[in-house]
Image (cartoon, grey):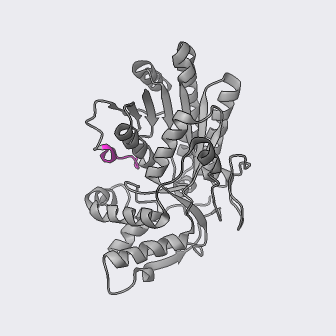
Amino acid sequence: MKIIVTGGAGFIGSAVIRHIISQTDHEVVNVDKLTYAANLETLESVSGDARYVFEQVDICDFEAMTRIFNQHQPDAIMHLAAESHVDRSIDGSKVFMETNVMGTYTLLEVARGYWNELENDRKEAFRFHHISTDEVYGSLGPTGLFTETTPYQPNSPYSSSKAASDHLVRAWHHTYGLPVVTSNCSNNYGLYQFPEKLVPLMILNALEGKPLPVYGKGDNVRDWLHVEDHASALYTIMTKGRLGETYNVGGNAEKQNIEVVHAICDTLDEMIPTDKPRRELITYVTDRPGHDQRYAIDATKIKNELGWEPSHTFETGFKETIQWYLDNKSWWQKIRDGKYSGERLGLKTG
């Protein structure tokens, strides 16, 4: 099987590629524009494998994507390319609409044209796997879980762009018969995550003795999913998921943001003791505009239908992640010195 992975130089996309190359005999074509958060160093372990090919292409480029499909003749596409940071979507929403909405539209049209020309078994076996987020469902109250039938209620430019792309994928399946599966995941963490996200930002700031900015009261709740668990779930959905269906992927680790920050501080204090507890670095800052209060995933469907469950607990996964950042300063220091130095984003409201 040959699989196109869009956004393969990103955090989740690179984990998917590493999983496929290390765990299967499939071939992978990595399609990535190489925006600020992309990093080919995340794929050094597979870059020399004959089954791996990289194409630097914007998914919005219809002609380039048509060439890639025709040249590489994929059996499936896993679509992860997206602008993904909520705060950046507040500061500048246009690129989110261009990439997440129009980019998905372009891919659907290119894939549809390619799929229509396939013959017999290859046409029957083709899959378009669209990877999305639980943020499309909006915000939960103190109780309840997101299921695959939860109505969409996105509250940020980012989540609305992902919701739009989800609806496009559904429409192309029901209108044109394109064989699609969709997945919506909870918050990812793990190795190689770009340091603007909560977990690596807090780890690196804590290591450097910088303030740990926590939005509002820190009581916003997220379900935390290790990126390697997510990668295995995505491969399972792509290969075993029922056509036209959506699968929610969660980590069974629902935590308040402040609990996550406390866990990072306490773990680092154990690993690298300092004169003062790192919890003293926590600084409560003005909340993000439109900040959803709580996300929580019901992953019963993927467990019952496809037999997938996360292998990392919150405790083991976060300790492993912190250790990785301690061991790989050369990877993240280049980013801190260049692309992103830890400044706050998402302050614009108009």
Q: Quadrant of the C terminus?
A: bottom right
- Quarter location, residue 321: bottom left
Look at the image and tell me whether residue 82 can be seen: no
Q: Quadrant of the N terminus?
A: top left
Question: Magenta part of the protein: which range?
Answer: 35-43
Does residue 225 belong to the magenta stretch?
no
**Residue at 71% in and 61% down:** 144
Compared to residue 32, the image places residue 283 above or below, namely: below
Given residues 105 and 249, the one toward you in this image is: 249
- Quarter location, residue 339: bottom left
Given residues 102 and 128, the one toward you in this image is: 128
Given residues 124 and 193, the one toward you in this image is: 124
Q: Position of residue 87 (x, y in %)?
A: 54, 58
Given residues 57 and 72, the one toward you in this image is: 72
**Residue at 55% in and 63% down:** 253
**Residue at 38% in and 58% down:** 340
Look at the image and tell me whether residue 285 can be seen: yes
Compared to residue 235, the image places residue 90 above or below, namely: below
Q: Is residue 147 left or right of residue 113?
A: right
Compared to residue 118, the image places residue 251 above or below, namely: below
**Residue at 38% in and 40% down:** 23
- Quarter location, residue 222: bottom right
